[in-house]
Amino acid sequence: MRSVLFVLTSNADLGDTGRETGYWLAEAAHPWKVFTDAGYRIDLASIKGGLPPVEGVELDDPDQVSFLEEPALQTTLRLSDVDPSKYDAVLYVGGHGSMWDFPGNLDIARIGAHVYDAGGVLAAVCHGPAGLLGITLADGTHLLDGKKVTSFSNAEEAEISLDVVVPFLLQDALIERGASYSDNGIFQPSVVVDERLVTGQNPPSAEGVAREVLRLLGD
């Protein structure tokens, strides 16, 4: 059985605004539905383990309701305990929380490098590509060097007035890391595939990201 690891943020604080954040529910729930329907085993992990903070909850979406009812969500694996050799793919789920605890996380880098070097697929959606910034492969090159990618854009961040709240602008950071960035306009879906790296621009892109992962894995 194919296996995919979902990586979720554990950060609940939206900077110093006093507002709460976390992972964006649709970005986990919609890929969850795609992979589950394809017969995949899915493990959920978060930076600290346990129940991760969530935002963007829409209870009129049955896929989101189903994901929230998943028992494994209550006790996600601590990322430091994860054995990457078990997985064919990793999905770094977005949500603004990931902008604080994904970059620089050694376990995110360890797991991502292992899976990619072993021939697996790495995927990230919206703010999830923040987890790609620190991944160096076995040959010493950076995962993002020359790769075509997308993510939540500077324009989208400004549209919701969080461009002055996030610790950095993800679009800029990806470009500075050596990636070739593109987007499809404010809040329009976009999925970019380069070799075995799949990135999605925003929540409407999440299902498409999962389907591209399935395609790359031959399912």
Image: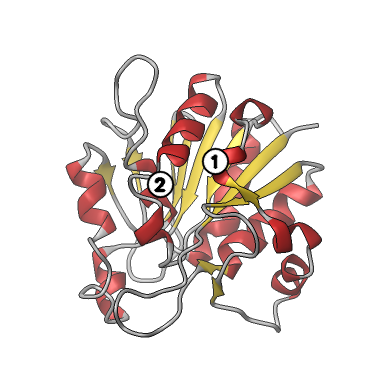
Question: In this picture, is 81 found above or below 11?
Answer: above
112 horizontally vs 217: left or right: left
Q: Residue at x 28, y 56 (%)?
A: 170
For residue 55, the mark is: none
Please name whichever residue, 146 or 78, is drawn nearer the observer in this view of the structure.
78
Colour scheme shown? secondary structure
Q: x and y percent of residue 39 in the render?
A: 82, 42
Q: Which mark is residue 131?
A: 2
Task: Report the side of 12 relative to 99 (left or right).
Answer: right
Q: Reply above or below: 86 against 185.
A: above
- The residue to which callout 1 is attached is 80
Where the N terminus falls, by quadrant? top right
Q: Quadrant of the C terminus?
A: top right
Q: Earlier in the sequence, mark 1 or mark 2?
A: 1
Q: Identify the secondary structure beneath mark 1.
A: helix
Q: Position of residue 87 (x, y in %)?
A: 65, 32
Q: Position of residue 107 (x, y in %)?
A: 47, 38
At 65% from the left edge and 39% from the top edge, which residue is drawn? 214
Kind of residue at disc 2: Gly
- Please report the residue visible at 54 percent of the width from the left and 77 percent of the height from the top: 56
- Asked whether the beta carbons under mark 1 and mark 2 sit within 8 Å of each other, the answer is no
Quadrant of residue 80 in the image? top right
Count of numbered circles on the image: 2
Q: Secondary structure at mark 2?
A: helix
Which of labels 1 and 2 is toward the front?
A: 1
Q: Residue furthest top?
A: 139
- Residue occupying image coordinates x 48% and y 20%: 117
Which three-letter amino acid code belongs to the residue tagged 1? Ser
Expressed as whole percent of the image width and height from the top left, the position of residue 206 reads 55, 58
